Image (cartoon, rainbow, N blue to C red):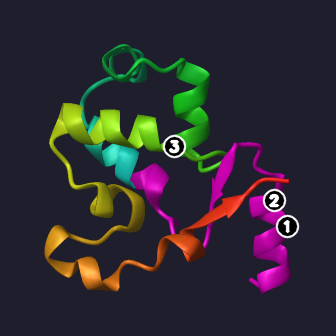
Amino acid sequence: MTDTRVESEVASKKTPVDLDATIVAGIGRRIREIRGALNQDDFCKLIGLQKRTLVRYESEKTYPSAETVAKICHEFGVNPAWLLFGHEGSNLGAIPPVSKVLRRSA
């Protein structure tokens, strides 16, 4: 996938601060893994989400806000670095700088 195509896909996601799709690839799978045997309705009640929002996160059509990431990590005891980037806490040096992860919306 070319950088232009990635930037176009990221730009199409309407959130106050967009996560770079190339860096957080797999976040939807990780959210499903965290959810485990919980159905989507029960997970949404715990985190305070609407089901359609969770479906969009899991399909990576949109990405969770920092607040939602914090809620998921707190409720399920997971490392934010793992949820966002797929890195375990012991590998924090592999996490890209914030400026490369977050992109300001226009």
Q: Amino acid at mark 3?
A: Glu
| Comes first in the chain, label 3 or label 1 | 1
Q: Secondary structure at mark 2?
A: helix
Q: Amino acid at mark 1?
A: Ser
Q: Position of residue 40 (x, y in %)?
A: 41, 23
What separation in Å lies between label 3 and label 1 (alpha carbons)? Answer: 20 Å
Residue to which mark 3 is pinned: 58
In the rendered structure, find residue 70 and report the number of the disc placed on it: none
Q: Position of residue 80 (x, y in %)?
A: 30, 55
Q: Secondary structure at mark 3?
A: helix
**Magenta residues, start to end:** 1-29
Q: Quadrant of residue 89?
A: bottom left
Circle 1 packing at 10 Å, graded few (<14), some (14-19), many (20+), is few
Residue to which mark 1 is pinned: 8
Magenta stretch contains residue 14? yes
Q: Secondary structure at mark 1?
A: helix
- What residue is at 70 percent from the left and 43 percent from the top? 15
The answer to whether residue 50 is above or below residue 73 is above
On the picture, is 14 further left or further right than 58? right
Q: Amino acid at mark 2?
A: Ala
- What residue is at 66 percent from the left and 55 percent from the top? 18
- What residue is at 37 percent from the left and 13 percent from the top? 45
From the image, state whether disc 3 or disc 1 is nearer to you: 1
Magenta stretch contains residue 67? no
Q: Quadrant of residue 46?
A: top left
Q: Are marks 1 and 2 in contact (CB under 8 Å)?
A: yes
Q: Position of residue 12 (x, y in %)?
A: 83, 53
User: Looking at the rendering, in which quadrant would you find the C terminus?
Assistant: bottom right
What separation in Å lies between label 3 and label 2 (alpha carbons)? Answer: 19 Å
In the rendered structure, find residue 11 and report the number of the disc placed on it: 2
